[in-house]
Image: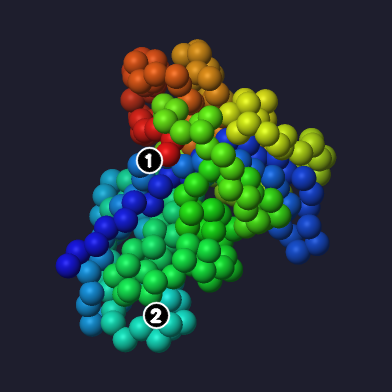
Amino acid sequence: MDHSEVAFAKINLALHVRRRRADGYHDIETLFAFAQGGDVLHAHVSDALSLEIDGPFGSGLAADDTNLVLQVAALLQSHFGVSQGAAIRLDKQLPIASGIGGGSADAAATARLLNRLWELNLSEQAIADILAPLGADIPACVFSRPSFGSGTGTELVFLDDSSITARYLLLVNPLQSVSTAAIFKAWAGVDGGEVARGNMWDTACVSRNDLEPLAAAICPVISDILKRLSSANPAIVRMSGSGATCFALFDDAASLQTARTTLNPHWWSMASMLR
């Protein structure tokens, strides 16, 4: 029997960089939210672990043990002594290295999928704890729920999502990748202050992404996208993660579609809603 799972695209409604740590990582504060769409994973029980990748961005990934999907599958198989394998297929709909958690979301969705396929009966918290060493965004992607993240992003507090769910979301990427390491390295080390706590929507509206100007300096088309989206008068327009994907949130579907018609046809875009 074939099982499937959506790897929901991750959005950073806010991303404040607070300090550079001795281990080379950075302490951040972020508001995680998730789109209703994303990559899709399929799997059925097999004798061994295997991975097939298709979809519009499938050619940019290797289907070998460097891929987080297979790393997660092998980790769960080993950790729990699973004798079964799994034939996994990844339908890669999201651009690679684009600031919306594609690889992390795929890893998290793989674990949720195999948890059902292999009947491991793990809680989401148990999955998040096991996968945390593989990537800072993965625990948030396991839950795919609005949350406040601190530390490197792995310390999560789930938030009342009533003010943000069902907002109309437009994602835009120029099909240019930017280096997360280079962008964090360019951070000047100035703490601009904490993410406010309270109503999630109100907080998102007054927050920022500290990596946005750094990414735009490396990839100037980010500024073009933000300017184009801003001209459509969205409620919020911002870059997600370390870029280059930007997003706009609208009050209604018609406004989103009007904004989408103004985009450069060479840019990738996806219309969705916050979940």
Q: Secondary structure at mark 1?
A: strand
Image position, residue 275 (x, y; %): 42, 39
Q: Quadrant of residue 260?
A: top left
Question: What residue appears at the point 38 percent right and 75 percent down from the top-left corner?
Answer: 120
Q: Is residue 181 left or right of residue 170?
A: right
Report which residue position mark 1 lands on. Answer: 36
- Tag 1: residue type? Gln
Question: What residue appears at the point 34 percent right and 63 percent down from the top-left corner?
Answer: 113
Question: What residue appears at the point 45 percent right and 77 percent down from the top-left corner?
Answer: 75
Q: From this view, report whether residue 173 is shown above or below residue 8.
A: above
Which mark, by number, is residue 109? Answer: none
Report which residue position mark 2 lands on. Answer: 77
Q: From this view, report whether residue 135 is shown above or below residue 157.
A: below
- Tag 2: residue type? Gln
In depth, the one of 268 and 134 nearer the eye is: 134
Q: Quadrant of residue 190?
A: top right
Q: Secondary structure at mark 2?
A: helix
Q: Residues within 10 Å of mark 1 (few under 14, many from 20)?
A: some
